[in-house]
Image (tube, rainbow, N blue to C red):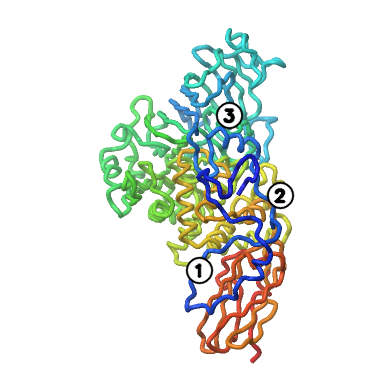
C-alpha cells in the first residue's frame, strides 16, 4: 500500500513490508474466476483475495509528506512498526496538589524534568493549560460554566523565573528563535494562548539534554454540569486536566500545538509521576499510580483488606458503608484535619484523581497475565447508587478479557470512580456517572477500561484521529459485552447508529479531524460507532484469526509509542498479506455506503443461480445463507473481487435439495444500509 510514491510500500521489494497484491491485474483474470464449489455444512470462511480490475479501483493511500519523511529517516517503517531510529521525548513530573472542597479550589506546585530524545535542538516548549477551556474568551466547541481558568503564580525554566509576555516580538515566536538572543537568555519568557502556553527557554535544549521546569498554580473546579472533570455538592470531585503539561514533540510533525476545544481529546508524552494529594480527612482517594502510604491514610483493617484484594477473585469491601457511617473511612487528620495521599506511577501519559467523603471502596483481583500476573480492580462510589455494587465484578471481567484479547494489563490497579462525568479515561483510572444497572453499567465500564489499551498504552493522536481511540475501544467493548452476556446487542447497536447516520447523510469521513466535524451527531458516529462497525467488517473480511493476531501485534508494536493511521493500515496489510487501499479509501477516507441486494434466484441443474447487485458505492464480500426444504442451511461466500468492473454478479451454488430461502449477510456482519432487499423466499 501507500506508495507507489517516495519508495513507500515497495510492492515485491525487500524493505521488510508485505509484498501485497498487485493493484492492477488483467480484467481477463476476473472472467476466468471459477464458479464456487458447493459449500460444506458449515462452510469454512476463507480470507478474501484483493480486488481485481484492469485499472486501480481506488487511488493508493498516500500519507502526508511529513510521514513519508519519517519513513526515510528511519523512525517509521512500511511494515507499520517503529523504525530503528524511532525516538520519543520523556517528561517526568513531581506534583503536590491540595483540594479545598468548600471553595472547590485546587492549588498545585509542580516540577518537570524534560528529556530531549529528539535529534533537534529546541528553543521553545509548548505546554497545555487545559483548565483554560473554562476561561473567558477562549475558543471552544462546548458550552461551559466559566471558572476563570488556570492562574499561573510562578513559571521557571532552567533555574530562571520567566515573565509572561517576554520574548514575544515578531521575530521571537515559537520556532523562530534568534540564536544570539536565545543563548543570552534575553528573550526567555512565556505567553499564554488559550489552552496553550509557549515557553521560550533561557538556553536552547540540545539533543540528549535535560530541561527542568517549575510551576505554581491554582484554579476553581467546575461543577456537576461539566465534562472530563467536575464536582458534586462540594464533597465529590473527579479531577483531570489539572496541571501544566508539556505537549508532544514527535518524529513526524514536531510540536503538536492542537488547542483543546472540548470535544477532541489528548495526545501526550510518557513519563513517571510522583504526586502528593492533600485532602480533608474522611475523603477516600483513588488516582493514577500506586498508593505509597496506605498505612498513613487508611485504618489498619482497610489497609490490610486492600493489600489482600488483588490475590482473590471475590469482591472485598475495603471501606464499606458501615465504616463510612461510623467515621472510620480514613485515619484522623490531626490538627490540620487533612491527610496526604502519596502516589507513584511509572511510564504513564497522564495523572488524574478522584476524592469524596461519600465513597465506599470495593476491590477484587483480576488475572491479567504477562509479567504482572494479577492486578487489583477498584470501584469507589456513592452507595446510594445501588447498582454500582456490581462495578468491581464488571471491571474484573473486562480487564481480564482485554488482557487476553489484546495484551496483558501492565499496572498495579485499575479503578473506576463514580462522579458527574458520564465516562472518561486516564491511566489506571476511569470516571463513570450514574449510568444504569446491568448492561448499561457494564457497557460504559468496559468501554472506558478498554481505553487502558487505546490510548493509555498505544498513544494515538486522539484529537486528529478519534477512530484510533474511541473507535477501537467501541469495537473492543462490543467483543467484551458479547463474551459477558452471550449476545451481539452492543455490536448491532453500533451498526444501527452508523446506518442511521449514513442514510441521513450526516456522517463524516473517519480521517477528518474531529474538531472539523461540524455536526455533533456525525462527530460521534465518526469517532465511535462507524469505526467499530468497520473494524468488525474488516474482521469478517480477513477472518477472525488473522484480524485478531494483527490487532494484538499492532498494540504490542506501538506500546508506549505514538502510532498514526498509516502505521495501523500497514500493520493490518502486512498480516493480511495483501493491499487493502480499496478498503481504507472507501471506509476511512470517504463516506461510501454498502447496499447489496438479491437480484434473483433461479434453478440451475444441481443448484441455484443467485444474482446479487451492488446498489451502493462501497465494496464488500458477498455472504449468503441458503435454506433448504428440510431446514438445513448452506453458507456461501464470494470475495470482494467479484465486484471488479461490475455492479451485478451471478453465480451458481450447488445444493443437495430445493432452496426455499436465500439471505444476504444473515448475521449482519457487514453494514448494509438496506436490509429489505437482502432476502429471497420461494413462493409456496
Q: Quadrant of the C terminus?
A: bottom right
10 Å crowding of disc 1: few (<14), some (14-19), many (20+) = some
Residue placed most toward the observer, 360 or 673: 673
Q: Secondary structure at mark 2?
A: loop
Q: Secondary structure at mark 3?
A: loop
Give the residue at x 43% y 62%: 483
Comparing marks 2 and 1, which lies closer to the viewer? 1
State the residue position of label 1. Answer: 45
State the residue position of label 2. Answer: 519
10 Å crowding of disc 3: few (<14), some (14-19), many (20+) = many
Give the residue at x 58% y 35%: 72
10 Å crowding of disc 2: few (<14), some (14-19), many (20+) = few
State the residue position of label 3. Answer: 129
Q: Secondary structure at mark 1?
A: loop
Question: How far from the left and from the top, in percent, is residue 325?
Answer: 36, 45
Left or right: residue 420 versus residue 509 is: left
Question: How far from the left and from the top, in percent, is residue 371?
Answer: 32, 44
Amino acid at each position: 500500500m501507500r506508495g507507489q510514491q517516495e519508495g513507500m510500500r515497495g510492492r515485491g521489494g525487500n524493505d521488510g513490508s508485505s509484498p501485497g497484491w498487485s493493484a492492477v491485474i488483467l480484467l481477463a483474470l476476473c472472467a476466468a474466476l471459477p464458479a464456487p464449489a458447493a459449500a460444506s455444512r458449515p462452510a469454512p470462511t476463507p480470507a478474501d483475495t484483493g480486488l481485481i480490475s484492469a485499472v486501480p479501483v481506488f487511488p493508493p493511500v498516500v500519507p502526508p509528506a511529513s510521514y513519508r519523511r519519517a519513513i526515510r529517516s528511519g523512525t517509521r517503517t512500511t511494515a507499520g512498526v517503529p523504525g530503528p531510529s524511532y525516538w520519543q521525548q520523556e517528561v517526568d513530573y513531581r506534583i503536590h496538589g491540595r483540594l479545598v472542597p468548600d471553595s472547590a479550589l485546587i492549588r498545585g506546585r509542580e516540577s518537570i524534568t524534560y528529556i530531549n530524545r529528539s535529534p533537534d535542538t529546541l528553543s521553545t516548549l509548548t505546554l497545555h493549560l487545559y483548565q483554560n477551556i473554562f476561561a473567558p474568551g477562549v475558543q471552544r466547541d462546548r458550552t461551559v460554566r466559566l471558572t476563570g481558568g488556570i492562574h499561573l503564580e510562578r513559571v521557571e525554566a532552567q533555574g530562571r523565573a520567566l515573565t509572561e509576555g517576554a520574548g514575544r516580538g515578531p521575530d521571537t515566536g515559537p520556532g523562530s528563535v534568534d540564536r544570539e538572543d536565545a543563548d543570552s537568555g534575553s528573550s526567555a519568557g512565556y505567553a499564554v494562548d488559550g489552552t496553550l502556553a509557549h515557553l521560550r527557554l533561557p538556553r536552547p535544549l540540545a539533543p540528549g539534554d535535560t530541561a527542568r521546569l517549575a510551576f505554581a498554580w491554582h484554579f476553581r473546579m467546575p461543577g456537576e454540569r461539566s465534562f472530563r472533570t467536575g464536582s458534586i455538592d462540594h464533597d465529590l470531585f473527579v479531577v483531570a486536566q489539572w496541571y501544566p503539561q508539556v505537549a508532544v514533540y514527535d518524529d513526524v510533525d514536531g510540536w503538536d500545538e492542537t488547542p483543546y476545544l472540548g470535544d477532541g481529546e489528548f495526545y501526550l508524552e510518557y513519563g513517571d509521576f510522583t504526586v502528593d494529594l492533600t485532602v480533608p480527612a474522611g475523603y477516600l482517594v483513588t488516582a493514577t499510580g500506586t498508593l505509597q502510604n496506605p498505612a498513613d491514610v487508611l485504618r489498619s483493617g482497610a489497609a490490610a483488606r486492600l493489600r489482600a484484594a488483588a490475590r482473590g477473585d471475590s469482591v472485598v469491601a475495603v471501606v464499606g458503608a458501615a465504616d463510612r457511617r461510623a467515621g472510620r473511612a480514613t485515619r484522623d487528620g490531626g490538627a490540620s484535619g487533612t491527610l496526604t495521599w502519596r502516589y507513584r506511577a511509572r511510564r504513564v501519559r497522564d495523572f488524574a484523581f478522584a476524592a469524596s467523603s461519600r465513597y465506599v471502596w470495593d476491590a477484587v483481583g483480576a488475572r491479567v497475565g504477562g509479567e504482572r500476573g494479577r492486578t487489583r480492580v477498584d470501584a469507589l462510589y456513592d452507595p446510594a447508587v445501588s447498582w454500582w455494587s456490581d462495578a468491581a465484578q464488571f471491571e474484573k471481567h473486562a480487564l481480564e478479557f482485554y488482557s487476553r484479547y489484546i495484551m496483558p494489563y501492565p499496572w498495579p490497579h485499575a479503578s473506576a470512580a463514580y462522579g458527574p462525568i458520564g465516562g472518561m479515561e486516564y491511566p489506571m483510572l476511569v470516571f463513570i456517572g450514574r449510568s444504569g444497572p446491568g448492561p448499561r453499567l457494564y457497557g460504559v465500564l468496559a468501554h472506558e477500561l478498554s481505553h487502558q489499551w487505546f490510548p493509555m498504552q498505544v498513544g494515538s493522536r486522539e484529537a486528529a484521529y478519534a477512530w484510533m481511540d474511541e473507535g477501537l475501544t467501541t469495537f473492543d467493548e462490543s467483543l467484551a459485552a458479547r463474551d459477558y452476556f452471550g449476545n451481539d446487542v452492543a455490536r448491532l447497536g453500533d451498526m444501527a447508529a452508523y446506518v442511521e447516520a449514513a442514510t441521513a447523510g450526516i456522517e463524516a469521513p473517519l480521517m477528518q479531524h474531529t474538531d472539523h466535524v461540524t455536526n455533533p451527531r456525525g462527530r460521534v458516529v465518526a469517532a465511535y460507532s462507524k469505526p467499530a462497525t468497520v473494524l468488525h467488517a474488516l474482521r469478517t473480511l480477513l477472518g477472525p484469526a488473522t484480524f485478531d493476531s494483527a490487532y494484538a501485534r499492532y498494540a504490542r508494536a506501538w506500546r508506549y509509542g505514538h502510532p498514526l493511521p498509516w502505521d495501523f493500515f500497514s500493520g493490518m496489510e502486512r498480516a493480511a498479506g495483501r493491499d487493502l487501499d480499496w478498503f481504507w479509501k472507501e471506509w476511512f477516507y470517504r463516506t461510501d455506503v454498502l447496499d447489496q441486494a438479491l437480484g434473483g434466484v433461479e434453478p440451475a441443474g444441481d443448484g441455484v443461480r443467485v444474482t446479487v447487485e451492488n446498489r451502493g458505492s462501497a465494496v464488500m464480500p458477498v455472504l449468503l445463507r441458503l435454506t433448504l426444504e428440510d431446514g438445513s442451511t448452506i453458507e456461501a461466500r464470494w470475495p470482494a473481487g467479484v465486484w471488479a468492473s461490475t455492479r451485478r454478479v451471478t453465480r451458481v451454488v450447488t445444493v443437495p435439495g430445493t432452496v426455499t430461502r436465500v439471505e444476504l449477510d444473515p448475521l449482519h456482519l457487514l453494514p448494509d444500509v438496506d436490509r429489505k432487499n437482502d432476502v429471497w423466499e420461494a413462493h409456496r
